Amino acid sequence: MEARKSNVQNADTVTSQASQQLNELEIEQVGLIYQQSFYPLIGTTGILLFFAYVLKNQNDPFTLILWLSAAIFIYIFRIALSLTYLRLPASRRSKHLPFWKKSFLLGSLLAGSAWGIGSILLLPASPLYQAFIVIVIGGGAAVAAMTHSAIRYAGMFFILPALLPLCAYYLLAGGIIYSGIGFLIIIFIFLISTASYYLYKMVCQNFNITYQNKLLISELRKSNTEALRLNIEMKKENIERRNAEERFRRLSEASNEGIVIQDQGTIVDVNSNIANLLGYDACELMG
């Protein structure tokens, strides 16, 4: 019965530690993804303006301004969200963790969709400008794959809506060149998604190592505290024993009777009265 209770308690402890580890992992992941994305978001806002400037003579001004305004609004929202999160104390971040995680993923989806819609809406007839659009959006997807790697599949919220419209356009356009570009985009999506996944695994492994080290340090501190406590108790016991021995010696010396203390037939202590009575020194009687 006792063994069963012990097994249940051990299982509960393991489950509790695993749950705590998963919770701390999620906190670290969300914090890392906000930290890694803040400056790229600011840089991408500048790229948006440059992107629109390059395409200004290739598109209808109203369409271009409308798209640019929506895209900048999305990026300002994401920057404000990141800035708010990074300025919050750790306790408030963890308290509303699902909200921050979902908000980031929603922002990534909106940003990716803005680029994807823009790639079709603003796609000019010139192959040179088309190549420019593919390079810009492909570069943004690669950056997202790296900066979003802390959370599994988070990069896909940006990559797929940003690149799939272009991919579908070139695959459906017909011709060897266009079809080849479409297949290259598919391969590119696969490669950056694979790289993002392996970065995610590295993040998890690093966190698990850090978490195990924290547990080990905590256990070592507990063991050290317990050792110090036992050492203090031992010192107190030694002091009390010496005080007791000293009190006993004073009482035995003050006694008028001869006192002999023996252990299994061996004399271990005598008082001065018995030594004087027998005519020996106390040390000569012991042993």
Image (cartoon, rainbow, N blue to C red):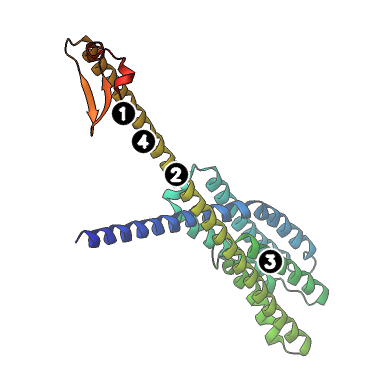
Element at badge 3? helix
Q: Amino acid at mark 2?
A: Ser
Give the vertical position of 256 relative to 9 (above or below): above
Rendering quarter of residue 144? bottom right
Q: Amino acid at mark 3?
A: Ala
Q: Amino acid at mark 4?
A: Leu
Q: Alpha-carbon distance for marks 2 and 1?
A: 45 Å
Element at badge 4? helix
Q: Which quarter shows the C terminus?
A: top left
Pick whichever of labels 3 and 2 is earlier in the sequence: 2
Query: Would you call the spot at circle 3 few (<14 residues within 10 Å), some (14-19), or many (20 or more)?
Result: many
Rendering quarter of residue 114? bottom right
Q: Name the spot of residue 164 as percent of width and height, x first.
A: 63, 76
- In the image, what residue occupies the spot 46% across and 50% down? 215
Q: Alpha-carbon distance for marks 3 and 4?
A: 58 Å
Residue where numbered disc 2 is placed = 91
Q: Alpha-carbon distance for marks 3 and 2?
A: 32 Å
Pick whichever of labels 4 and 1 is earlier in the sequence: 4
Q: Alpha-carbon distance for marks 4 and 1?
A: 10 Å
Q: Name the spot of residue 104 as percent of width and height, x first.
A: 53, 58
Residue where numbered disc 3 is placed = 142
Q: Is residue 77 visible?
A: no
Residue where numbered disc 4 is placed = 230
Foreground mark, 2 or 4, reads: 4
Q: Name the spot of residue 149 as percent of width and height, x first.
A: 59, 63
Q: Is residue 127 visible?
A: yes
Element at badge 1? helix
Residue in the foreground of this view, choosing between 182 and 275:
275
Pick whichever of labels 2 and 4 is earlier in the sequence: 2
